[in-house]
């Protein structure tokens, strides 16, 4: 298994009146080179689980294993390295940085690696061209359409050539055509040998023919069968 | 006198360090009782997160501890002008019964704190907290000494009465008198020279071998490095100081701190402390060199420490030899 979670719990505001249990003992396995969807309504814990798997948050208890290597106990400086090299993130709002160009947005995740800027530019340009956005390289992201922004966000997630793509509600702000286009892109990335994990309650995503497994979540627990 | 800025800094600093270490020790006990890296329990994950905060806290506390030795030496040296009979720090420390114990405790704690910082540095390089238990054990051993030092140091400063007539270093480190200082000063010069240069040669030879081959010779380097500190201090009192002062009977280990001698004492003691801390650090790390994740990290750190220790002692040896060769004093008859 590529990613495994063992009895993962995440509790916010522990022992306070507003204590909230976001995850309550999640044990799942996500295989490599597959497209897995975390399905569930808002508040079911999908995003929390994704952020723990993606090393962006730590669980309150439980362990997460990446390629059989335990990662929840790792100090932040090691986690940052794993996060940068292993995971590519696509966010619900895309989280592109306004005021800078598409090309610069794509280069951002690679800056901490310290590669020469000329190499970064070349790689980012190749990615933009792969997504048919070569001519938009020098355009500020505020001038891009929804579909173009989505493709820039995907290109940015691929900048460090990650083995896992994590997408949180990626189609929430897209129309049906763009949502299907997004799933086509994910299928292509899967065929390239990447593992795709998507959190979504959009039927276009979880009912897609490209999906290999669906993990249904509700109220912080795995509600449905793991269909892999 | 207690309102002297450096005294206030030392007392406040040691009180703060003591409080931080008390808190860290309580956490250390919790770590030693409950630490289980294989567990994913809430407590274990909380301990893993908290250990960073505590380690950072202790690192700063021990960082101050290292600096405070030099501040203490400087303060004691500076205060000598206020006491009748005192010519340097030697006299100031003799004003009451707490001076020399405070200095000895500060030197011991300097070396112990340095060893802890090396252990912590190594632990932070590995991914699986291999030295966490060891460094909290060491912390629990060091903490009482730091607390004791804070008390002794406070007592020393609180008991400084300007009407006390103290002894000067000429009397304390005279070969004619009795006592520890005189005993150290009266050690025969030629045998001491032979011991000093033999010990330095043995340390370098063993250091080069350990640097290249690794293995268990690191334990020998630890003993040689720690022993070299004692030998060097004795050599400094016995004969090196004579060449610096260019006086055949002046063995004081403190006058070399003064501006008259270019503050060379700070450099010499600094080198000895760096050399000894690095060697003690090697001794602290040696038992863990075959421990899982440290197997790849530790050889590099041990080599670096060996090099630092050797360089520090060699520079000390070069300065001492330089003083002997270029001093106007000749001690052929000794």
Image: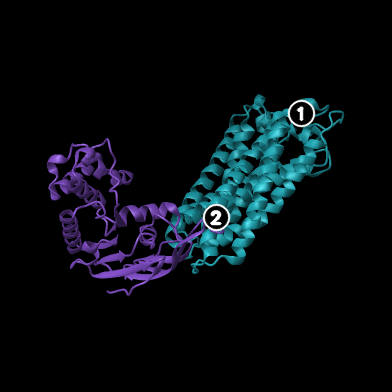
Do tags 2 and 1 sit on the same chain? yes
Label ID, residue B80: 1
Q: Nearer the viewer, residue A164 or B20?
A: A164
Residue A164 picture location, percent across and down: 28, 60
Does B97 sit above or below residue B263? below
Q: Nearer the viewer, residue B203 or A36?
A: A36
Work out how far the residue at label 2 is from the one at label 1, CA to CA, in angstroms: 45 Å
Residue A78's quadrant in the figure? Answer: bottom left
Lateral position of residue A97 relative to residue A5, left or right:
left
Lateral position of residue B82 relative to residue B34, left or right:
right
Q: Quadrant of the N terminus of chain A?
A: bottom left
Lateral position of residue B167 relative to residue A162, left or right:
right
Q: Which chain is purple?
A: A
Residue A48's quadrant in the figure? Answer: bottom left
The hue of chain B in the figure is cyan
Residue A151 picture location, percent across and down: 19, 49
How crowded pointer 1 is (Cα within 10 Å; few <14, some 14-19, many 20+) is rated as many
Q: Secondary structure at mark 2?
A: helix
Does B85 sit above or below residue A141? above
How crowded pointer 2 is (Cα within 10 Å; few <14, some 14-19, many 20+) is rated as some
Looking at the image, can residue B99 be seen? no
Residue B144 picture location, percent across and down: 71, 53
Residue at the spot of label 2 = B50
Q: Quadrant of the C terminus of chain A?
A: bottom left
Q: Are marks 2 and 1 in contact (CB under 8 Å)?
A: no
Q: How many marks?
A: 2
Residue A181 picture location, percent across and down: 16, 56
Looking at the image, can residue B24 be seen? yes
């Amino acid at each position: 298994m590529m990613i495994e979670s063992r009895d993962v719990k995440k509790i916010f505001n522990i022992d306070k009146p507003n204590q909230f249990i976001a995850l309550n003992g999640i044990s799942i396995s996500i295989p490599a080179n597959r497209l897995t969807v975390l399905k569930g309504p808002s508040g079911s814990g999908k995003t929390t689980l994704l952020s723990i798997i993606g090393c962006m948050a730590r669980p309150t208890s439980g362990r997460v294993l990446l390629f059989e290597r335990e990662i929840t106990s790792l100090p932040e400086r090691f986690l940052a390295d794993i996060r940068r090299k292993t995971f590519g993130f696509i966010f619900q709002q895309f989280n592109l940085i306004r005021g800078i160009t598409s090309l610069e947005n794509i280069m951002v995740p690679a800056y901490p690696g310290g590669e020469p800027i000329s190499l970064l530019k070349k790689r980012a340009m190749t990615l933009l061209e792969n997504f048919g956005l070569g001519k938009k390289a020098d355009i500020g992201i505020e001038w891009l359409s929804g579909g173009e922004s989505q493709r820039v966000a995907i290109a940015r997630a691929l900048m460090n050539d990650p083995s896992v793509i994590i997408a949180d509600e990626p189609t929430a702000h897209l129309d049906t055509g763009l949502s299907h286009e997004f799933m086509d892109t994910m299928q292509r990335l899967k065929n390239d040998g990447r593992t795709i994990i998507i959190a979504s309650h959009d039927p276009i995503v979880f009912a897609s023919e490209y999906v290999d497994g669906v993990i249904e979540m509700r109220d912080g627990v795995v509600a449905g069968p793991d269909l892999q | 006198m207690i309102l002297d800025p450096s005294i206030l800094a030392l007392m406040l600093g040691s009180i703060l360090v003591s409080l931080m270490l008390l808190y860290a020790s309580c956490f250390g006990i919790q770590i030693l009782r409950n630490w289980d890296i294989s567990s994913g329990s809430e407590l274990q994950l909380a301990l893993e997160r908290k250990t960073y905060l505590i380690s950072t806290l202790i690192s700063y506390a021990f960082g101050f501890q290292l600096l405070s030795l030099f501040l203490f030496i400087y303060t004691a040296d500076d205060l000598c002008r206020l006491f009748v009979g005192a010519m340097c720090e030697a006299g100031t420390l003799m004003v009451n019964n707490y001076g020399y114990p405070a200095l000895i405790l500060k030197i011991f704690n300097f070396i112990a704190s340095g060893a802890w910082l090396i252990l912590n540095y190594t632990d932070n390089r590995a991914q699986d907290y291999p030295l966490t238990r060891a460094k909290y054990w060491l912390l629990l051993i060091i903490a009482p000494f730091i607390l004791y030092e804070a008390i002794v140091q406070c007592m020393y400063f609180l008991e400084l009465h300007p009407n006390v007539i103290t002894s000067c270093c000429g009397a304390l480190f005279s070969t004619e008198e009795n006592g520890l200082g005189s005993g150290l000063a009266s050690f025969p010069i030629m045998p001491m020279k032979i011991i000093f240069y033999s010990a330095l040669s043995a340390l370098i030879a063993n250091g080069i071998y350990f640097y290249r081959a690794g293995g268990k010779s690191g334990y020998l380097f630890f003993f040689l490095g720690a022993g070299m500190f004692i030998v060097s201090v004795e050599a400094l009192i016995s004969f090196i100081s004579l060449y610096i002062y260019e006086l055949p009977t002046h063995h004081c280990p403190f006058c070399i701190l003064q501006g008259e001698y270019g503050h060379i004492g700070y450099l010499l003691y600094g080198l000895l402390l760096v050399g000894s801390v690095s060697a003690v650090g090697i001794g602290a790390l040696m038992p863990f060199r075959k421990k899982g994740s440290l197997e790849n990290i530790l050889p590099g750190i041990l080599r670096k420490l060996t090099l630092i220790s050797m360089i520090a002692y060699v520079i000390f040896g070069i300065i001492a030899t330089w003083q002997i060769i270029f001093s106007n004093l000749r001690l052929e008859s000794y």
